[in-house]
Amino acid sequence: MDRRASTSSALTVSTMASPLPTRRPTHKDEAWRYADLNALEALWPLPAPEAIMVPAGGGLKRAIVPEGGVTQIELTLGKGAQASLHVLNSAGDYGRVELDVKLHEAADFTLDAVQLASESQSMEIVTTVRHLEPGATSRQTIRNIASAKGSVTYLGQVAVAEGAQKTDSEQDVKSMLLDRTATANAKPELEIFADDVQCAHGATVGELDAGALFYLASRGLPPARAKQLMLQAFVAGVFDEAEEAEKLAEAALSKLGEMV
């Protein structure tokens, strides 16, 4: 699979260049608070964000599997448009996927993502989802796993504009740490200026259940295989709706095999 391949079912998708960032970020910038700035220095200057417009009634499906570095996408959905992004962020010393999504009336956005960080890798997903008009929906499901000195981060803001009634939004973030030296950062955030909305978010950080590992070991499974099966269950279903579901799942399992 082309590590940056994408598939699209959009009726019409227009792509435009955006201005290049001019200032190097610091940890004082909220969106870059946990970033590996040393790794970022080597990547500077960043490429222009990719800007995608899905027209009214259109549809987009895309798999994003970066080879590391910074991937920035500005996505606008017209009235009734739909977009579904599936992200596997696990390659390179530093990998950051940054999404800025604008939703117009009755638009629907879904993000399903897995981040895997081993050794001293730093993986980040940063999203801003802007509900600009009534009746739009957004769903974000993030599963993070870190081992050794790896770091996984999710920063996600959902902003509901005044007048964007009937907004329906959810952020579901779960992180698993395989070693005490690993790090997980999660900050789902809501900014709501409408009063007739359904918005929810949740974030958890945990470790593999020792009792379950003991049970699997008592049934003859080697420890590494037992851990792999439990981690496979942890990320199960995230890529089910992707057009490249099998390839994405295989790539995730291959990385998990290296981590246990």
Image (cartoon, rainbow, N blue to C red):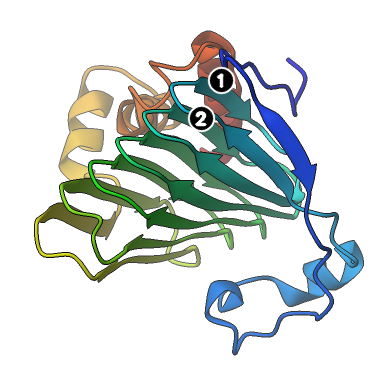
Of 159 and 152, nearer the camera is: 159
Report the residue marked by disc 2.
Answer: 86
Can residue 101 be seen in the rendering of this structure? yes
Instruction: Point out the residue furthest to the bottom here.
Output: 28
Say above or below: 213 vs 246.
below
Task: Judge left or right: residue 163 versus residue 175.
Answer: left
Mark 1 to mark 2 CA distance (whole Å): 9 Å
Residue 156 picture quarter? bottom left
What residue is rendered at 39% in x and 36% in y?
Answer: 109
SS under mark 1: helix
Q: Which mark is residue 248?
A: 1
SS under mark 2: strand
Q: Which mark is residue 35?
A: none
Residue type, mark 1 in image: Leu
Instruction: Point out the residue furthest to the left here.
Output: 196
Task: Judge left or right: residue 200 versus residue 35.
Answer: left
What residue is rendered at 67% in x and 60% in y?
Answer: 120
Query: Residue 135: image x %, image y %?
Result: 23, 41
Query: Residue 119: image x %, image y %?
Result: 65, 54
Residue 191 picture quarter? bottom left
Say above or below: 185 vs 174.
below
What residue is rendered at 25% in x and 55% in y?
Answer: 164
Residue type, mark 2 in image: His
Of 233 and 96, nearer the camera is: 96
Say above or below: 84 vs 95.
above
Q: Quadrant of the N terminus?
A: top right
Label pair 1/2, CB-CB below 8 angstroms: yes
| Dot 2 crowding, Cα within 10 Å, few <14, some 14–19, many 20+ | many
Give the label, 1 or 2, closer to the camera. 2
Task: Please tell me how many numbered marks the rendered image carries.
Answer: 2
What residue is rendered at 67% in x and 22% in y?
Answer: 6
